[in-house]
Image (cartoon, rainbow, N blue to C red):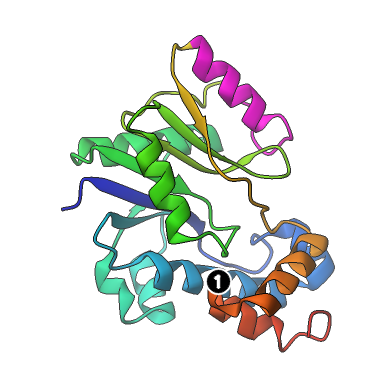
Amino acid sequence: MADTALVIVARYPQIGTTKTRLARALGNEETVRLYRAFLTDLACRFAGQTAYDLHWAYTPAGVDYAAFMAELAPSPVRHMQFFPQEGDGLGERLHNAFCQTYAQGYERTVLIGSDSPQISADTVTEASRALDKADVALGPAEDGGYYMIAMCRPHDVFQGIPMSTDAVLRKTVELAHRLGLEVSLQETLFDIDELSDLARLAQVLKTDASLAPATAALLATMKEFA
């Protein structure tokens, strides 16, 4: 077992529940295909790394997420572990994910979302290294949230945070400071929530498709982004 857990917070893609803001512009079926590509890219990039063990914190709890990922990424799946998200709200589910890996004996946990398929392995490594001095490492998202949070211990920096708002990062930093925790901010990235975000990602991937090959290949077939 590595001393670091990388946890990807993800959803089982279903019509009507997957990235609903994007689906309003793109359509439900195309959005599901896109999200599956996101998950494929993340799995292929992060599975089998020696610096950390890859875990998926998935929802809904009743699905066989291991079988689903074996379909998307048959070779890397042997390097993955899975556990369902637990809790009533997103903040509680994130906190419980940290509690889960801490209970398993991991010294550090880096948690990322599944809405930024272009996130690099170096970004995860830098967040883990930041914990040498900081209690919390956060990867700011351009919309005011964060795409990544890393901690050695499961500090509850989620209680009372208005999730899915543009105040998430600011209020999380404020709460961490009130708890006496040192915070390190990492590089800023953008999430893919709206059609404009997807258009931006398409341009990035035209320059370097290796950042998210499955996503790049799918976008190349879509007339809006070809």
Residue at image position (69%, 64%) is 16
Instruction: Inspect the magenta stretch and tell me whether residue 220 lies in it.
Output: no
Based on the displayed image, in which of its 4 quarters is residue 194 positioned?
bottom right
Where residue 30 sits: x, y (%)?
71, 77
Where residue 175 sits: x, y (%)?
55, 17
Residue picked out by circle 1: 211
Instruction: Inspect the magenta stretch and tell me whether residue 170 lies in it.
Output: yes
Residue at image position (26%, 68%) is 79
In front of the other: 117 or 132:
132
Residue 15 vs 166, above or below: the answer is below
Residue at image position (43%, 43%) is 127
Residue 187 vs 74, above or below: the answer is above
From this viewpoint, is residue 170 visible?
yes
Magenta extent: 161-178
Residue at image position (78%, 86%) is 226
- Label 1 neighbour load within 10 Å: few <14, some 14-19, many 20+: some
Left or right of 162: which side holds 187?
left
In front of the other: 29 or 159:
159
Left or right of 173: which side holds 199?
right
What type is the residue that disc 1 sits on? Leu
Residue 33 vs 56, above or below: the answer is below
Q: What secondary structure is the magenta-colored segment mainly?
A: helix
Left or right of 2: which side holds 100?
right
